[in-house]
Amino acid sequence: MVALSAAADKGINRGAAPVTYGQGDRPPRGDYAAARADYTCEQDWNAYTAADHDLYRRLYERQSAQLPGFACEEFIGAVAHLGSPSQIPRFDALTDKVYRATKWQVVAVPGLIPEEAFFSLLSQRKFPVTGWIRRPEEFDYVVEPDVFHDLFGHVPLLFNPMFADYMQAYGTGGLKASRLESCEYLARLYWYTVEFGLIDTPAGLRAYGAGILSSAGELRHSVTSPQPQRLGFDLERIMRTRYKIDSFQASYFVIDSFRQLFDATAPDFTPVYARVAQMGELDAEQRLSTDRVF
Ligand code: PHE
Ligand code: FE
């Protein structure tokens, strides 16, 4: 599955609702008329059907069964906070738990939202989660992020204090990147960390990116396949690297710890964006002599 909730894909139609992904002519799936100015809305939990809950349960069970050995321990330890797999969680109940842990909140949105709205919510420690769930025929692959990707993929690590702080810093940094017209660089950072990041642990490489963790096929692939390259985290290298939105990633970037991720992204990015703009872009599969290869 390609899981899209990166800043990039939330940002195509800045300021305009509804938001659709890419050039697609698919109609937006959420009810944007019901959204507030900040794009949040009510979850409307009662509108989920028994079939919706059942689909969520099947997705949850397939995914949780394959976490051991592939997902990082921080994620595995926090998945239980999502509550019973048999029903789509109530976002309010999740907020009660995650707020107590790290002061984050889970808020409902109709679907993809403009990048500024997305950054603004993150900067307030509010994580936007899509209300709708995919159709049964999209069990293996859904183009846009749905409630399963957003909740299962993203919410568990919001319980981790260091990662939680990184997500907020990312939001604040996004608002700044918008002013500097550097959102594309920052979106790549989101993609290669929050969505498709790997972490080096004593037990071996593990996934912490939500796009991997909510994907049936890419979880094992990202950790064990000889096909993709796995490179040491390098901020400017990542900002130069294009990514694939319709296939498994050709490159994954590996962090040593959430502390490393937080510290490496703490400095002011203004000069970083200027340097990266000079250096030029890289294709997803490119290899540099300076890459630290895993
Ligand atoms: N340090 C970044 C800046 O000044 C903000 C940021 C932090 C961006 C963490 C992403 C992640 O722009
Ligand atoms: Fe996502």
Image: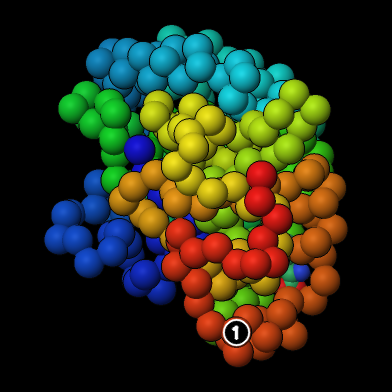
- Ligand 1 positioned in quadrant: bottom right
Indicate if the residue with disc 1 has its beta carbon within 8 Å of ligand 1: no
* Side of 258 where 173 appears, left or right: left
Numbered-mark total: 1
Q: Is residue 150 visible?
A: no
The image position of residue 165, as x and y in percent, is 78, 50
The image position of residue 225, as x and y in percent, is 48, 34
* Side of 259 where 137 appears, left or right: left
Look at the image and tell me in which quarter the N terminus lies. top left
Q: Please, which residue is most extreme toward the left here?
A: 25
Q: Residue at image x 56%, y 20%?
A: 67
Mark 1 secondary-structure assignment:
helix
Q: Residue at image x 61%, y 27%?
A: 71
Q: Residue at image x 46%, y 20%?
A: 63
The image position of residue 27, as x and y in percent, is 17, 54
> Which corner quadrant of the image does residue 130 belong to?
top left
Q: Is residue 19 above or below residue 99?
A: below
Task: Report the amino acid beneath label 1.
Answer: Met
Q: Which is nearer the eye, 104 or 5? A: 5
Residue beneath disc 1: 279
| Neighbours of disc 1 within 10 Å: few (<14), some (14-19), many (20+) | few
Look at the image and tell me in which quarter the C terminus lies. top right
Q: Residue at image x 62%, y 19%?
A: 69
Q: Is residue 252 visible?
A: yes
